[in-house]
């Protein structure tokens, strides 16, 4: 099983890119994890944000691996503790499908992307910069995989 993080936005700050790369490397022992950056839709004065979100959605859908189990990161999604995420990861592994985690743009996911998500995951009610969400997702997936492998990283 492989996992892909499909994230709208480009050029993460160096500290995000370095942190993500560190957890991506650690996670690779248990779950190959790839980042796919999606070009954001055009926004600004006189531009339609809905159109930008739809354009992003088309690019996200095109980046999905065939037959992947799709988990959309979404504030109203299901909140999971680290232990619950480990249980979900074990469940996803049992399905034998690749995973795709989706981070939307400033207005969230397009209706088409939301409709194809197999589940929605919320990392909490806080509004976070989407670049930071990349790092949090990578760390939490690493933590979940480490828990399943009885690695001492998680000490709750």
Image: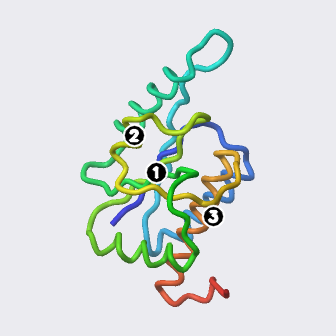
The residue pinned by badge 1 equals: 72
Query: Which structural element holds mark 1?
Result: strand
Q: Which residue is mark 2?
A: 113
Q: Quadrant of the C terminus?
A: bottom right
Give how far apart the Cα atoms at labels 3 and 2 are. 29 Å
Which mark is first along the chain, 3 or 1?
A: 3
Please name the residue that numbered disc 3 is placed on: 22
Mark 2 lies on a secondary structure that is helix
Residue located 30% across and 54% down the image: 68
Instruction: Report, in whole angstroms, how far the alpha carbon at label 1 lies from the one at label 3.
Output: 23 Å
User: Quadrant of the rendered structure where residue 114 is?
Assistant: top left
96 relative position to 121: left or right: left
- Residue at 37%, 40% in the rendered image: 63
Residue 62 marker:
none
Outermost residue, top side: 46
Q: Are marks 3 and 2 in contact (CB under 8 Å)?
A: no
Viewer-side label of 3, 2? 2
x, y (%) of residue 14? Answer: 73, 47
């Amino acid at each position: 099983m492989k996992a892909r993080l499909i994230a709208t936005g480009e050029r993460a700050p160096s500290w995000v890119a370095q942190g993500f790369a560190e957890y991506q490397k650690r996670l690779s022992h248990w779950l190959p994890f790839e980042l796919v950056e999606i070009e954001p839709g055009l926004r600004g004065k006189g531009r339609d944000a809905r159109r930008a979100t739809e354009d992003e959605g088309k690019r996200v859908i095109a980046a999905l691996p065939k037959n992947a189990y799709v988990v959309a990161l979404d504030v109203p999604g299901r909140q999971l503790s680290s232990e619950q995420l480990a249980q979900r990861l074990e469940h996803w592994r049992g399905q034998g499908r690749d995973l795709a985690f989706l981070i939307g743009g400033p207005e969230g996911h397009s209706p088409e992307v939301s409709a194809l998500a197999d589940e929605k995951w919320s990392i909490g009610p806080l509004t976070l910069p989407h670049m930071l969400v990349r790092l949090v997702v990578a760390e939490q997936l690493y933590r979940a995989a480490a828990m399943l492998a009885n690695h001492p990283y998680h000490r709750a």
